[in-house]
Amino acid sequence: MKKRMIGLALGVVTAVAMCMTANADELIKVGIINNDPNESTYRTANVKDLEQAFSEENGFEAKTFYSLNNDEQIDAAKQFIQEGVDYLLLSAAATTGWDTVLQDAQAEGIPVILFDRTIDADESLYEASVVSDMAKEGQTAVDWLAGQGLDEYNIIHIQGTMGSAAQVGRSGALDQMVADNDNWNIVAQQTADWNAETAQQIVQSVIDSGDSFNVIYAENDNMAAGAVKALDSAGISHGVGKDVIIMGFDTTTDGLKELKAGNWNYDGQCNPFQSEYLLDIISKLEAGETLEEKTIIMDEKGFDAETITDEDIEKYGVGGDTTEAETEVETTAAE
Amino acid sequence: MSDTKKNTNAAGLLSRLMRNQIFIPLAALVLLVIVNLIAGPSFFKISYSANNAGDMILSGYPISILNFGSELAILAIGMTLVTAASGGQDISVGAAIAIAGSVILRVLCGNAGSHPASMQAPIIVAFLIGCVVAMLFGAFNGILVAYFHIQPMVATLILYTAGRSIAAWINNNELPVIAEPEFGYFGGFIPGIPIPVPIFIAAICMIVMALVLKFTTLGLYTQAVGINEKSARLNGLNPTFIKFLSFVILGLCVAVAGFIKVSRLSTINYSVIAKDIEMDAILAVALGGNALSGGKFSMVASILGAYVIQFLTQTLYRFKVSSDALPAYKAVVVIILVVASAPAAREKISSLWKNRKAHAKEVG
């Protein structure tokens, strides 16, 4: 407790020092531990967002470590603690094994902020966590679907990798709805492991069987894209005002463009842009304020094909066109 | 020859067929057909209708199986040669497909960003460069196995681990999308031709391989090296080169399979493209009754094995096996098939058969 007080006092002192030196010579040292950016479009956007936010211009000195291996992450965390970072930001690869490291951090007075993923550790061991509520994402999507007012819902449900937080959350709401309503039927429920091509095969298989359906609920945009390929080759129309409603998640730029074009109907957000929340938390801690809530659940939207705008695609689209936009800027500058 | 004369009766024919390597995959295929027929003859219905582009195409379960099984069948060709020559398997084919696919898309995108308005290079150029790169990676595996005598599974573990990261790196971790429909033809349909193009590509690969095996000594040499490396060398063969060559050929197969994969969706996802396909490819070889320790092989049996796997997947989808249970069902079927087709099991069965006959004679 004493150490913690000292840590807190030190924190206040540095914060005061920060305020005094307007040029902010003293950078705030943050250690960021995240998953491998190659994991998915989502992760790439997540890593990029954090790297941009915790830049030197913004007054930070960021040390980063990316791995899908929990043990490597733990080692890196120990290293960061030894090097004496001011904050430790953590998106753990696995939920367990973090207690000792977090205790070390606490003993050194380093606040730990979890982002994106939560872990199995006592709440007192971390300062705050910023997470997505996957169940809420699923519920938002299912509520939207219910709002379409179809007489009968015959759904092809394409699941993500079984047991992942995203799959469990997004499947849960739909399963509940189907169990509660007689006019909601599952035509096929199958995992495609986030793989577009497997999704294509699953939908093709339903088409081959001759069963009729009017909704495809895919748990991410890649799988929705694969499903649409199968519909296209079978001559089944899809999108706004067509035979089959297409639903996806993760709001990839490509997915949102399909939405805008009216080929898909719904896309649910899973927000990878967590830096604004993290910056907010850190500025509050730097100012010595206490946080109102420990777990911050990000506000996530669901987009409807009929109301989506180009600004939405620009603002919420994940991955995709960024480099193209940059090269365009470069060429215009050269001209 | 006298054996053939004796076995003119029906039972003899059956036992001869059973001893043939192709029996297990063939039997599995027949079994799957029967199961699906019992569940409803609609399984074999093929319809002829227009797709969303307005072209008339064939569709139905049999077409889907042949279509989606194409990549696996192509990989099975290369995997059979690698297995026969080196007595081990390449577990990096999935990662290598990611690399080949990534290279093809990179060439097509050129410097125009990840969503080019038009393709920056002819498809054939992109494909050929993809082939060269995949064969280089195959050569890398081949050198480790043939020249440094590293166990194939360990040698290919390197690419298995690193491959998908390399693939992502080739495209600066962007996910390129090719909008032009021509690129999608190779994983879909060419307007005017109602049969999916991957089926043709797989057929071409099989014909080429059949011609190579018929008119060159590749098959014979590969088997000789696989059966006994030392005696092969004493007979003037170069086992090192033959092993190396088998990995390069697999590299070519990987490039073709990767080309179909990226063409199917006109894009790539490094972490999931062709995921776990190496296991299915090895399984196809095993289902074909080929000894995984090398030596004699049957190319036809391996290819048949590949389609059996796709047939099984399609059947499980059709019976709407739940997602949680799918791998378990697949595993049960696979265990039965692989055990039945294992050379050891077949020997055991045939020796049991002989013993019974001998016993019957003695009693008689």
Image (tube, rainbow, N blue to C red):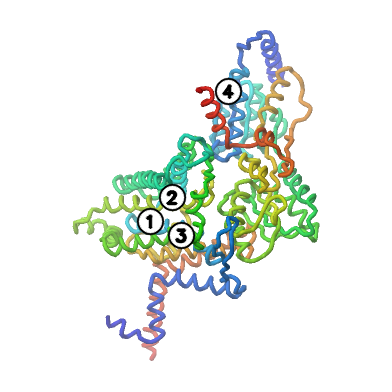
Horizontal arrangement in the rendering, residue B166 relative to residue A275 (left or right): left
Residue A102, given in percent of the width and then of the height, sits at 64, 30
Position of B244 with respect to B305 (left or right) is left
Asked if residue A287 is positioned above or below residue B119 in the image, the reply reads: above
Name the kind of residue labelled 3 in the image.
Answer: Leu
Q: Are marks 3 and 1 in contact (CB under 8 Å)?
A: no
Q: How many angstroms separate mark 1 from mark 2 (CA)?
A: 10 Å
Secondary structure of residue under mark 1? helix
Q: Which residue is mark 2?
A: B93
| Camera-nearest label, 4 or 2 | 2
The quadrant where residue B35 appears: bottom right
Q: Nearer the viewer, residue B114 or A281?
A: B114
Chain on which label 2 sits: B
Contact, mark 1 vs mark 2 (Cβ under 8 Å): yes
* Chain at numbered mark 1: B
Q: Give the alpha-carbon distance from disc 2 to disc 3, as whole Å.
A: 13 Å
Q: Earlier in the sequence, mark 2 or mark 3?
A: 2
Q: Secondary structure at mark 2?
A: helix
Q: Amino acid at mark 4?
A: Ala
Let me know if residue A165 appears in the view.
Answer: no
Residue B153 in the image: state x and y as whole percent: 40, 50
Q: Quadrant of residue B85?
A: bottom left
Question: Which label is found at residue A62?
Answer: 4
Q: Pointer 1: what residue?
A: B78
Tag 3 residue: B283
Q: Chain of mark 4?
A: A
